[in-house]
Image (tube, rainbow, N blue to C red):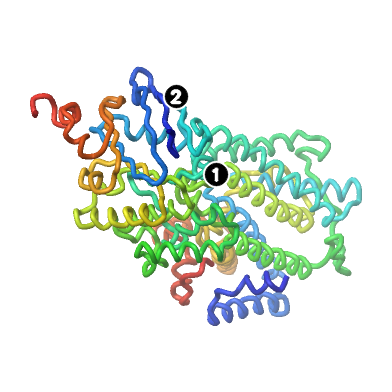
C-alpha cells in the first residue's frame, strides 16, 4: 500500500505537489467558510468533476465517445434507491449491487459495438440509443413507479448517518469530495499502468495499436466496463442527495451532455481537466445566474445558453481545453496530469 | 527446406480483381527478403495477408511452424511479426518514448521495465534526445525510424517493412539502410520488406521476389532479378526495352 502511495506522486515536482496540497486543503476546509447555497454549488461541482472523470476513462483515455453516460448514473441511482425504499438496504450495500449492474450494461453496449465494428459517430449514437431505451423503459416500469417517480424518505438533518447517507449537505460534500479524490487516484494509476498505455494507443490510432499487438476489443471492453462501474456511484449519490428519481430526468440526454461538458472544457484525456472544467462551468454558471438575480432578471434557460457560449469559446480558442495551457503556465510539463 | 515464414499458394480476390494470385515464397531465418513490383502489383495486399486482419481466399501462411492465415493483426504481432505502415502511423499525441513503451509492453507487464527497454532502443536508433517530444513533432525520417523502433520493441522474429524508405532523401535512405543492415547482422532479425526504392533493395535484400498483376514473375538474388527480361519489361513496358 505505501508503495502505491509513493508511486502516485513520484514523478511530480515540488511545485506541483505544493499546488495540489493547497488545492486539497482549500477543498477540505471549504465547508467552514461557505454558506449553504455555496456548499450546494460545491457539491454539484464535485459531482460533475467525478462523473466527468468517469466518462473521461472511456473517451479521454480509450477514445470511445459515449453520449449516453446518463444510463450508468440512472441504473446506479435506481438500483440503490429500490434496494433502500423497498428492502431497507443501505446505499453502500446498494453500491455493491449498482456497480455490477452498470458494469454489465456497459459490457453489453461495448460488446455489441466492438464485436460488430460500430465505431466513431455510430458508437456515440448507439450509446444515446441505449440511454433513451432505458429512459423509455423505466418510464413504463411499474416496479419502480414508472413516470410517477421514485422517492426516498427525506433526510433528517438532525444528525448525520453516513452508513445510510442521510444527513446534512456538509456530509454529502465530504462524501463527494472523497469520491472525487478516489476517482482521480484511480485514473492516475490506470494511466500509468500497462492498460493505460494501451488505451492511449487505441485512442491515437486503433489500427496501429492492433499492429503493435494490442487486443483492442479486450481493452476497449475494459474501458467501458470500468467507466460504467465508476459512474454508477454518482447515481447512488444522486438518489440519496436529491431523494427523487424520474426516468425523464435521470436518463435524459441533457444529463449525459452535462456530464461531458466539464472534461471537454477542462481538457479531454487529462486528469485535472474534468475537475477544472467542472469548477469553471458550474462555478461561472452559478455566478451568472446569481448576478442576474441580483439585477432582477430571471431568465429560465440562461444557464444552458451560458454553457453553449462557454463550449463555443473553448472549442474555438482552446481546442485542447483549459487545463493543458494552464498546466504549462504552472510549469507542469512531462507529466500526464 | 521451409523458412521462418512460408507463404504457400496464396490468393486473394476483390470481386473480379485478383490482387494476389497463387503466390508462394519462403523467408529463411536471419535473412532480408524483398518484394518488389510496379504499382498495383499486389504487394500491399500480400503484406496485409501476412500481417493479419485480412484472410486469404486460398493458400496457407505458416510462421514459425504455425499457420497464421486469417489471424487478427494483434494475434499475428503477438506471435512475433511486427510491421510498419507505408504512411507512417506513430501515436501522434504520445511522446516518442511512450510510443516505444507501448510496443515494449507487449512482452512486459511493468511499465518501468518497459521504459528501460524503450530507452535502450531509442539510444540505439538515435532518438533518445527527442524522447519527450510528441511523435507528431518529429520530421518524416524520424517518424519512420520511430515506427521501426516501436515495431522492434515488440521483439519480433520477423519485421515487415512497408516502403520504409519511401519519401526519404538519398542520405536518409542510406542511414536507415545501415541501421537495418546492422540490426539484421547483429541480432539475426529476419526482415520482409516491400520496397520501391531499388537503392535500398539492392543494398539490403539477399533475395527478391517480383510481383506483377498479382503473380510472381521472378525470384532470386537482387542481381539476377534486375537483369531478368520479364522484370525489366514489367517495369519499363515492352517498348522500353
In this view of the protein, can residue A220 be seen by the observer?
yes
Provide residue A207's location: percent of width, then percent of height. 45, 43
In this view of the protein, can residue A277 be seen by the observer?
no
- Quarter of the image with the C terminus of chain B in it: top left
Q: Are marks 2 and 1 in contact (CB under 8 Å)?
A: no
Provide residue B203's location: percent of width, then percent of height. 24, 48
Kindly state the secondary structure of the residue where label 1 is placed.
helix
What subunit carries mark 2? Answer: B
Nearest the viewer among B227 and A313 is B227
Q: Farthest residue in the right direction?
A: A88
Kindly state the secondary structure of the residue where label 2 is placed.
strand
Residue tagged 2: B59
Task: Say which quarter of the image contains residue A75.
Answer: top right
Numbered badge on residue A216: 1
Nearest the viewer among A179 and B225 is B225
Provide residue A67's location: percent of width, then percent of height. 57, 45
Question: How many discs mark residues in the rendered view?
Answer: 2
Numbered badge on residue A35: none
Amino acid at each position: 500500500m505505501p508503495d502505491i502511495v509513493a508511486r502516485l506522486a513520484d514523478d511530480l515536482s515540488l511545485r506541483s505537489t505544493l499546488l495540489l496540497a493547497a488545492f486539497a486543503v482549500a477543498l477540505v476546509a471549504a465547508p467552514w467558510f461557505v454558506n449553504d447555497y455555496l456548499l450546494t454549488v460545491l457539491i454539484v461541482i464535485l459531482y460533475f468533476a467525478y462523473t466527468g472523470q468517469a466518462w473521461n476513462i472511456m473517451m479521454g483515455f480509450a477514445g470511445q465517445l459515449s453520449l449516453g453516460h446518463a444510463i450508468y448514473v440512472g441504473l446506479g441511482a435506481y438500483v440503490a434507491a429500490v434496494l433502500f425504499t423497498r428492502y431497507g438496504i443501505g446505499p453502500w450495500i446498494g453500491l455493491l449491487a449498482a456497480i455490477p449492474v452498470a458494469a454489465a450494461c456497459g459490457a453489453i453496449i461495448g460488446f455489441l459495438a466492438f464485436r460488430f465494428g460500430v465505431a466513431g459517430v455510430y458508437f456515440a449514437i448507439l450509446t444515446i440509443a441505449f440511454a433513451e431505451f432505458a429512459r423509455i423503459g423505466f418510464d413504463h416500469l411499474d416496479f419502480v413507479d414508472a413516470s410517477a417517480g421514485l422517492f426516498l424518505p427525506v433526510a433528517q438533518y438532525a444528525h448525520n448517518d453516513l452508513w445510510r447517507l442521510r444527513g446534512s449537505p456538509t456530509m454529502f460534500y465530504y462524501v463527494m469530495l472523497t469520491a472525487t479524490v478516489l476517482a482521480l487516484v484511480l485514473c492516475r494509476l490506470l494511466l500509468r499502468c500497462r492498460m493505460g498505455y494501451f488505451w492511449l494507443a487505441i485512442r491515437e490510432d486503433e489500427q496501429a495499436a492492433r499492429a503493435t499487438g494490442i487486443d483492442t476489443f479486450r481493452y476497449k471492453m475494459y474501458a467501458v466496463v470500468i467507466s460504467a462501474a465508476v459512474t454508477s456511484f454518482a447515481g447512488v449519490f444522486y438518489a440519496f442527495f436529491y431523494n427523487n428519481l424520474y426516468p425523464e430526468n435521470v436518463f435524459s440526454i441533457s444529463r449525459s451532455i452535462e456530464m461531458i461538458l466539464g472534461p471537454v472544457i477542462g481538457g479531454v484525456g487529462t486528469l485535472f481537466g474534468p475537475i477544472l472544467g467542472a469548477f469553471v462551468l458550474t462555478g461561472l454558471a452559478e455566478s451568472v445566474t446569481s448576478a442576474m438575480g441580483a439585477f432582477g432578471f430571471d431568465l429560465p434557460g440562461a444557464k444552458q445558453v451560458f454553457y453553449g457560449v462557454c463550449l463555443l469559446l473553448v472549442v474555438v480558442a482552446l481546442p485542447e481545453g483549459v487545463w493543458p495551457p494552464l498546466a504549462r503556465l504552472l510549469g507542469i510539463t512531462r507529466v500526464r496530469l | 527446406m521451409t523458412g521462418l515464414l512460408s507463404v504457400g499458394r496464396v490468393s486473394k480476390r476483390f470481386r473480379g480483381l485478383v490482387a494476389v494470385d497463387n503466390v508462394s515464397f519462403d523467408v529463411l531465418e536471419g535473412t532480408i527478403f524483398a518484394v518488389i513490383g510496379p504499382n498495383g502489383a499486389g504487394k500491399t495486399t500480400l503484406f496485409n495477408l501476412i500481417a493479419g486482419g485480412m484472410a486469404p481466399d486460398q493458400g496457407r501462411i505458416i510462421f514459425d511452424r504455425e499457420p497464421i492465415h486469417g489471424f487478427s493483426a494483434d494475434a499475428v504481432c503477438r506471435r512475433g511479426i511486427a510491421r510498419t505502415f507505408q504512411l507512417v502511423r506513430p501515436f501522434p499525441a504520445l511522446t516518442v518514448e511512450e510510443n516505444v513503451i507501448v510496443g515494449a509492453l507487449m512482452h512486459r507487464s511493468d511499465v518501468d521495465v518497459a521504459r528501460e527497454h524503450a530507452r535502450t532502443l531509442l539510444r540505439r536508433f538515435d532518438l533518445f534526445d527527442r524522447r519527450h517530444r510528441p511523435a507528431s513533432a518529429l520530421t518524416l525520417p524520424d517518424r519512420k525510424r520511430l515506427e521501426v523502433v516501436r515495431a522492434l520493441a515488440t521483439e519480433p522474429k520477423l519485421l515487415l517493412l512497408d516502403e520504409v524508405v519511401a519519401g526519404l532523401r538519398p542520405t536518409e535512405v542510406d542511414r536507415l539502410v545501415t541501421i537495418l543492415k546492422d540490426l539484421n547482422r547483429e541480432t539475426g532479425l529476419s526482415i520482409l520488406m516491400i520496397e520501391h526504392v531499388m537503392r535500398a533493395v539492392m543494398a539490403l535484400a539477399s533475395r527478391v521476389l517480383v510481383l506483377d498483376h498479382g503473380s510472381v514473375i521472378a525470384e532470386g538474388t537482387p542481381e539476377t532479378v534486375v537483369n531478368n527480361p520479364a522484370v525489366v519489361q514489367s517495369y519499363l513496358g515492352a517498348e522500353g526495352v
